[in-house]
Amino acid sequence: MAGASGTSIWLQRARARIENSQEWEEFVGRLLEAVHQQMAESHVSAFLDLSRAEKAFVLQKAAKAIQGGDSYKALMSQVSSCLEEQIYVQIAQEMQGGEGVKNKMALLLRHLKDGAVTILEQRPDLKEQLRCLFNQPLPADLRSLTWRLYLSNAKARLQYLSQRTMNKTTSLKDREIFWRCQALLDSEPTFQSLRGNNVAAKCLRNVLSYYHKLQGMSTPLCEQDYLLPVPLLQVILDVATPSISVDTVSTLLVEEFLTLMKQQPWLPRPSTTQDPIHASTVEEVASLLKQLDRDLVRSLESIYFRSEGDSKEALLKGVRHMLQPAICTLFVGYLSKETLLYIWDQIILGIEQPSYNCIPVFATIFILLLRDQLLSCQSPAELEAIVKTQGAVLSVPAFQDMVGKHFFEELYSQLCSDSNRPFPIHDPTQALPPWSYRGPQIAAPPRTRPEDRRKTRLERDLLQRQHMERMEQEDKLRRSREEEDKRQREIQFLQLLEETEKKFEMQKVHLENQLTQERQFCYEMQTKAEEQIGELQAEINRLRERKMPSLDTCSAGSLLAPAPSPQSQMSLETSQPLHFLAETDNRHITSNREGQTARTFTLELLKWMMEAASAMVNGQSTEEQESLDTTTRKHLQNYKQDYKNAKIELFGYEISEEELEDISEHRRKTLKEKLEGILRRGAEAHYKAQLAARNLPGSIIYRGLL
């Protein structure tokens, strides 16, 4: 298949043929003559002397004057023949080249559609020409472009983008809105393609949350607000690429939805039962039903007369009860996807036309197409159930046929009513004031010469340039003031930072002094412990010296420990490790009595010393080990949190390691020193808090050395 480039090629060829044709030259000549005539009537000697608005007015007036003439008809005939010739040449080339579709009609429709899309993208002001497609379902990409052109709102889009940059687009009921959006997309049978689509649910949530915030309502949104954005979202996603972002879709959907909701003259609200707009719509539907199907009207009147007891208003009440929910949601949830989008095509084509309102017509057709099912009903509940459940089976051709038979001429005339308005023939630059009974007393303004108008225009341009220069100077002055204020704030910040660093340095010195004292205290405790260990080692050496000269000839009694000295008895009474040593000595004597050698005794002694050291480092029980592990993990968590807080304090946010590596070497070194200083302060603060929270013992007794 040929892409968009093929469409551009045949359009460019047709344009070149038209511009080089004799018909175009004759039309341009007639147009120039009409322009000169308009300029002569307005006393303008040169076309360039006119402003842009005056040039556009003169050209439109001249084109309107020759429209319908021989040159205009000849040019239109030439345009049609050139377009037809070039598009068929393009189709023939594609079919001969074996590219994609071989169906000539499909290729023709595709190129016509692509050509319309290309022209509309280049000239959005030609969107009114799409009215010729009234009562036709639009292709997906042409539908998306048409809806976007008619529902565009630059102000709403820019306001949403500015609010989104400040994170002010979320309603207080955002979570509730998201749940309802998911439930709606999962349960709505009209849009099965959106079921389980997270992108669709998020976009719908973003739009409705922003709309709820704009409304300033404390109550939840109504069902109409949830259903109306769904067709707009469906059309956007039908032509969107798989890589499109949620923000892009949300921005476009906000723009279109807000434009649609502002069209209040034809969009009734569900809660306003006494709304005159809704009442007029119901009355028009009832009137059309009376004209087209008297039998159905009598059936509805009889059913609602029995239930309501009011024959005069029976039909109006019946139509209101059956169609009010469907009209308020523009038939969303009542028709199939293709039929619903076809009706929305007709609504959006005339959304800018005040005299055009096709909703009563499509509501009437909706009832007429369900005629057979409605005639079999016996109660209002059955009628309303038929309207709710049977509308999904109605097709696009059925609606097209009914519109073509009964309503096409009236709706199309309303749609194109502005094209039949008379074109003004006065010159806006020389317009006289409205007539007044004091007219003879007021002199008419004098005619101005082209030179005077040119002089006035030059003076006006000069004033505009001077104004722009003055605005630029004021802008420069404002920026210089802002920069000066910024420099002053930076100086103040640096001064505050220096004072803070001095204060932290003093605190650091104080904490270092406390740390030195604590280290001295720990050193003294360690010295005492080493002295006790030395005494124990000396006691072990004395036991070893009492061995016999020959290990092979020594008896079990020779390895018995001597009687304890007074010094050892004092140590045994005052020190727990000596008591433990006595137990070790007893075990050693028992071991010798069983025939163990001095080597076995030494190995066991070393094993007991290692176990004692392990108990000092890792704890003697499982509870102590778990306590040590918990303390270690807590220290690691404190370090990570201090590191994160240091980044936030220094940079204003948690900077990543990659961003740190991108900073220059000199500045990175300075920043790392500041980070280390902040981390050091945090560690010292934690240590000081621990010292304050607990009372250290005056002396340390090491248990389980051996």
Image (cartoon, helix red, strand yellow):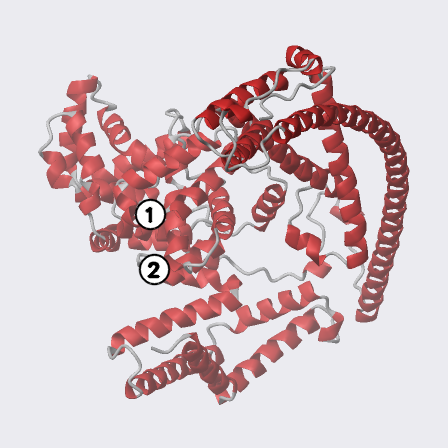
Q: Between residue 27 and residue 351, name the one nearer to us.
A: 351
Residue 702 in percent (x, y) is at 64, 22
* Mark closest to the chain's N terminus, 2 or 1: 2
- The image position of residue 595, as x and y in percent, is 44, 30
Instruction: Answer yes or no: is residue 283 visible.
Output: no
Residue 291 place in picture, x, y as percent: 21, 41
| Left or right: where 565 falls relative to 511 | left
The answer to whether 267 appears left or right of 650 in the picture is left
Q: Which residue is mark 2?
A: 138
**Residue that label 1 marks:** 194
Q: How far apart, in angstroms, are the residues tagged by discs 2 and 1?
A: 20 Å
Which residue is at 91% across, 38% downward?
Answer: 495
- Residue 370 versus residue 157: which sits nearer the camera? 157
Amino acid beneath label 2: Leu
Q: Secondary structure at mark 1?
A: helix
Q: Residues within 10 Å of mark 1 (few under 14, many from 20)?
A: many
Residue beneath the point at 31% across and 55% down? 409
For this orientation, the residue located farthest to the left is 376
**Quadrant in which the C terminus is drawn:** top right
Q: Looking at the image, which is closer to me, 507 or 662? A: 507
Nearest-to-viewer mark from 2 and 1 = 1
Image quadrant where residue 488 sits: top right
At label 1, the amino acid type is Leu
Q: On the rendered image, what quadrant is the N terminus found in?
A: bottom left
Question: In terms of secondary structure, where does tag 2 sit?
Answer: loop
Left or right of residue 291, residue 577 in this image: right
